[in-house]
Image (cartoon, rainbow, N blue to C red):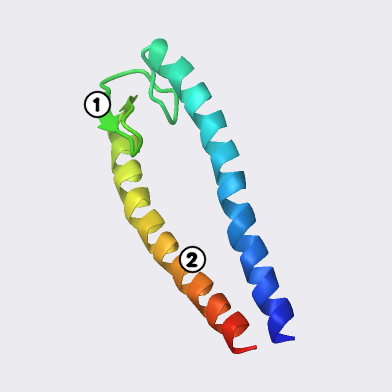
Amino acid sequence: MELAAAFFLIVVIGVFPVIALGMQVYRDSRGKKRNLAMRCYACESSGYLLPVPHYKGDTFLYCLLCVERQHRSRHVLGYVAMALIAVAVVGWLIISRG
């Protein structure tokens, strides 16, 4: 049973980045089109736009509300990454003991 649980955790941790990458590629292509039209990357509103650098070096334009949301989500994603690392360590410990 422990081996099955550890295998499940490893599969979930391995599949999650692939799904997240696909979603990010879709969002980036849609957001770049919006920015070319001078609209917000996230919500497509037009108005005062602020540049926000992303983790991979690109800078996109966001409205004021979306800038705040982007900063909040950056903190949440850090906590999610720490939780995934903790789950991976627990899975590795289960496998190594078994």
Using the image, tell me which numbered label, if any, was put on residue 7. none
Q: From the viewer's perspective, is 20 left or right of 63?
A: right
Quarter assignment of residue 35: top left
Residue 81 is situated, as x and y percent measured from the top left of the image, at 42, 60
Q: Secondary structure at mark 1?
A: strand
Using the image, tell me which numbered label, if any, was put on residue 50. 1
Q: Is residue 5 above or below residue 31?
A: below
Q: From the viewer's perspective, is 34 left or right of 49?
A: right
Residue type, mark 1 in image: Leu
Q: From the viewer's perspective, is 91 left or right of 58?
A: right
Q: Residue at x 51, y 23 (%)?
A: 29
Quarter assignment of residue 45: top left
Residue type, mark 2 in image: Leu
Q: Nearer the viewer, residue 26 or 70?
A: 26
Quarter assignment of residue 3: bottom right
Residue 60 is situated, as x and y percent measured from the top left of the image, at 33, 26
Q: Residue at x 61, y 45 (%)?
A: 19
Q: Is residue 62 above or below residue 21?
A: above
Q: Nearer the viewer, residue 72 or 26?
A: 26
Q: Residue at x 36, y 13 (%)?
A: 38
Q: Nearer the viewer, residue 7 or 62?
A: 7
Residue 12 is situated, as x and y percent measured from the top left of the image, at 64, 62
Q: Secondary structure at mark 2?
A: helix
Q: Residues within 10 Å of mark 1 (few under 14, many from 20)?
A: some
Question: Could you tell which of marks 1 and 2 lies nearer the N-terminus?
Answer: 1
Q: Return the residue at label 2.
A: 84
